[in-house]
Amino acid sequence: MSDRPTQRDYVLCLSNRGYKASLVVRKLYEAVPDEEGARRGLLRVVDESGEDYLFRQVLFAAVELPAEVREQLAS
């Protein structure tokens, strides 16, 4: 599993096609920075198992959250 960043980013799952056991549509997930994956059109996400894996970026939409919400999700 990758080291978690201090500033966490979150994404909304738009589709779980091909990953029904790993992703839930309309659920918020933590995204983990992965430059190599991004160059390949992939996004590293902490999935339902609690581990981070690479998924196609098109399955997600980036979400901006208020600081208070970020703090609650981080705890």
Image (tube, rainbow, N blue to C red):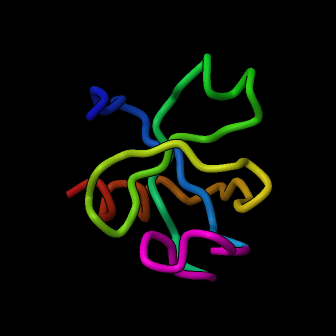
Vertical placement of 41 versus 62: above or below?
above
Q: Between 25 and 20, which is closer to the camera in this rendering?
A: 20
Q: Quadrant of residue 37?
A: top right
What residue sits 72% from the left and 62% below the top?
A: 59
60, 69: nearer the viewer: 60
Image side of residue 46 versus residue 19, left or right: left
| Residue appearing at x 26%, y 35% in the figure | 1
Q: Residue at x 51, y 41 (%)?
A: 44
Q: How many marks?
A: 0
Quarter of the image that includes the C terminus: bottom left
Find out whether residue 26 is within the magenta segment: no
Q: Which residues are magenta?
A: 15-25
Front one among 47 and 29:
47
Check the image and report above or below for 59 versus 27: above
Q: Where does residue 67 sit, x and y in percent of width and height?
A: 47, 53
User: Which residue sits at x=63%, y=67%?
Assistant: 12
Q: Position of residue 51 (x, y in %)?
A: 29, 51
Q: What x and y, as percent, mark residue 14?
A: 72, 73
